[in-house]
Image: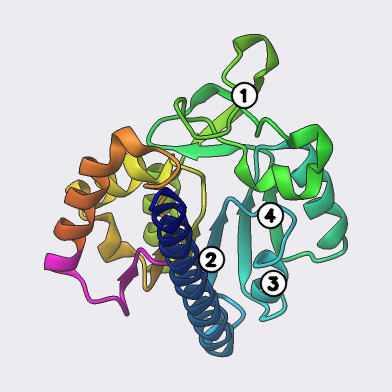
Amino acid sequence: MADLAAQHAALIADHDKLKRRAKRNARAQFARGLLQGIVSMLRPGDVVMDCGANVGAVTGPLAETGATVHAFEPDPFAFAQLSARVAGMQNVVLHHAAVGVTAGRVGLMRATNFEANRMAGSVKSTVIPGGHNIDQAEANSIEVEQIALPDMIRDIAAERGEVAFLKMDIEGAELDLLEHMQAEGLFELVRLTVAETHENKFRDLRPRFAALRNAVAAHYPVTRVNLDWI
């Protein structure tokens, strides 16, 4: 009986893993299609923001439209890759910085396996403590600049009328920012906002993420604010 119970539990675990993988693949496919639609509509003169640009997988296609791209990346390793990828693209403005509600200096923490695989590990770097599989040791954190994103959004909108596109994949830091944007009406200044939220990485923050999703869904369609980017 114990063997049968163990086999049954293993089958359930495998089934759940396959369901999660299928869901991730579906979200990734949707994001690729959405990005293709976005780049087809952007034009020179538009201003877009790639927060958490990492090595430039999204920055590159955005820049090829001729739009002005503000790309933000705090991790030194990823920023070097990003800089090399967009070298020569005069319409890309690089910011070696994190983004937040306010400006200042913050500590950047990396994945516990960063040194084993820097390319894969760099996407997990975060300025938010408490993340799963993140090195929390203060001695290992890197002090980086943080830019006040709401101020930049207001400034660009005042000059250009709107931010054409805002992508946010910033490993937990999106929660404070998106809450602030919702409270201050800043989504109104952006044609389309997409963000990946990180409930699974920051389990203690799940109630706030759920409340944020409900608040955003009550005011905006997914064609205006989409929190299922990947």
Labels 2 and 1: the sequence-earlier one = 2
Tell me how far mark 3 sits from mark 4, CA to CA.
10 Å
* Amino acid type for the residue under numbered disc 1: Asp
Q: Which residue is mark 2?
A: 48
Q: Which residue is mark 4?
A: 93
Tell me how far mark 3 sits from mark 1, CA to CA.
33 Å
> Quick one: SS at disc 4?
strand
Residue at image position (67%, 9%) is 139
Labels 2 and 3: the sequence-earlier one = 2
Residue at image position (46%, 65%) is 11
Mark 1 vs mark 4: in front: 1
Q: In the image, which disc is placed on residue 135?
A: 1
Labels 3 and 1: the sequence-earlier one = 3
Residue 223 among those drawn in magenta: yes
> Quick one: SS at disc 2?
strand
Camera-nearest residue between 8 and 165: 8
Q: Quadrant of residue 204?
A: top left
x, y percentage for residue 68? 62, 67
Tell me how far mark 2 sits from mark 3, CA to CA.
9 Å
Q: Which residue is mark 3?
A: 63
Number of other residues with Cα within 10 Å of mark 4, as a class: few under 14, some 14 to 19, many 20 or more: some
* Amino acid type for the residue under numbered disc 4: Val
Labels 1 and 4: the sequence-earlier one = 4
Residue at image position (51%, 46%) is 170
> Quick one: SS at disc 3?
helix
Q: In the rendered view, does 173 fall on the left or right side of 29?
A: left
Q: Quadrant of residue 137?
A: top right
x, y percentage for residue 18? 50, 70
